[in-house]
Amino acid sequence: MSSAAQFREVFNDFIVVAIPTRTDFRGINVREAALFRGPAGWSEFSPFLEYDNNEARTWLKAAVEGAYQEWPRLLRGEVKVNATLPRVSAEKVPEVLARFPGCTTIKIKIDDFENDHYLVEAALEEVPDAKIRLDVNGGWSLQQALLNLHDYHLRFGKVFEYVEQPCLALEDLRALKAEIPFKIAVDESIRKNLGSDLAALREVADVAIVKWAPSGGIAAARGLIESIGLPAVVSSALDTGIGISHSAALAASLSGAEYACGLGTVSLLMDDVVEPPVVAINGVISVGRSTPSSGQLHKYLASPERHNWWQNRITSIWNSGLSEEVKDLGWLK
């Protein structure tokens, strides 16, 4: 069987879409995603373009699991989600938050206090009783974290649910945790160290941010959460409604539901491949397998060049050993 035929056999109805974002998010203004179908349903492969094959490998494993494996038992039919506020101007904050109706938790992307405290002010003007999450993406040194968080606490008090990944180094997180009145959540500390013993994170953090695709799928994410031993927040990576459906299933399969999940991010895109789009209604999203609309697929169809680029990327990862791993797991008949 030719490699092209093998690709078609595993990645049925393969299609690549390109959906504009509403604002610049992580430097992205068009979100590309490769979609395909298996016996269990539709799935999505959409690692960010700068990720190398080694990092993108877990994303492809998750995507194949999503297409070929049934979900675990779900404990609820909907999951509570947070609003996500990128670094926009103050006058755009009401417009952004209006796309997250009913969400009373707001995650805000920040760089520092001096330049971004206005985002917290504007968010609280729109949702006065909101729980605020600050997401730093590991951008601070220990000293910067201490100074910025002191200023945020002095200005806004106890509105903060947690600060996400203020520093990257575990020793900095440990020192910070002893000094600040904030809970600490870790994201990059998990997904950049998947092969490590992550139990040590219990000493430096209070919350684990876990993502379906970067973890390698639902089964891998559930195992990760168990091994870390912290309350988990299931979050997304700017997926379409196909990827979000798998993340929502992960969240709905967990016994704890203490925190709102970061799964409302389809609202940061101009549209979705699913109709109606998988967005928050009254602060929650429903859990269920998503199927793309043929009209939406046609509307956001990527160019032939981008289609080939994604197919080549998947083929390279698949042929580097992932196909054998998946066969050993018994996913492919």
Image (cartoon, rainbow, N blue to C red):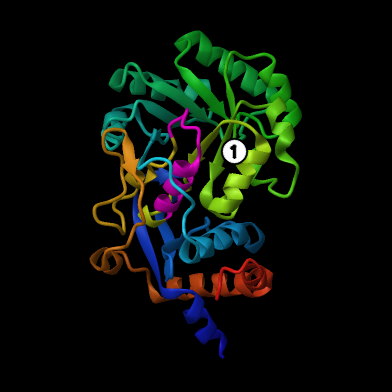
Identity of the residue drawn at 50% across and 32% down: 256
User: Residue 194 versus residue 40: which sits nearer the camera?
Assistant: 40
Residue 33, image x, y percentages: 43, 61
Identity of the residue drawn at 29% across and 53% down: 271
The residue at which mark 1 appears reads as: 187
Q: Mark 1: which secondary structure?
A: loop
Residue 46, image x, y percentages: 48, 59
Left or right? Give the position of 201 relative to 105.
right
Q: Taking the image as drawn, is residue 27 in sight?
A: no
Residue 11, image x, y percentages: 47, 74
Q: Quadrant of residue 55?
A: bottom right
From this viewpoint, which residue is outermost toward the bottom?
1
Q: Taking the image as drawn, is residue 78 in sight?
A: yes
Image quarter (top left, top right, bottom left or bottom right) of the N terminus? bottom right
Residue 4, image x, y percentages: 52, 85
Amino acid type of the residue that numbered disc 1 sits on in the rendered structure: Asp
Residue 313 is a magenta residue? no
User: Residue 152 versus residue 62: which sits nearer the camera?
Assistant: 62
From the viewer's perspective, is residue 60 above or below residue 259? below
Left or right? Give the position of 101 relative to 220.
left
Q: Quadrant of residue 139?
A: top right
Q: In which quarter of the image is residue 23?
A: top left
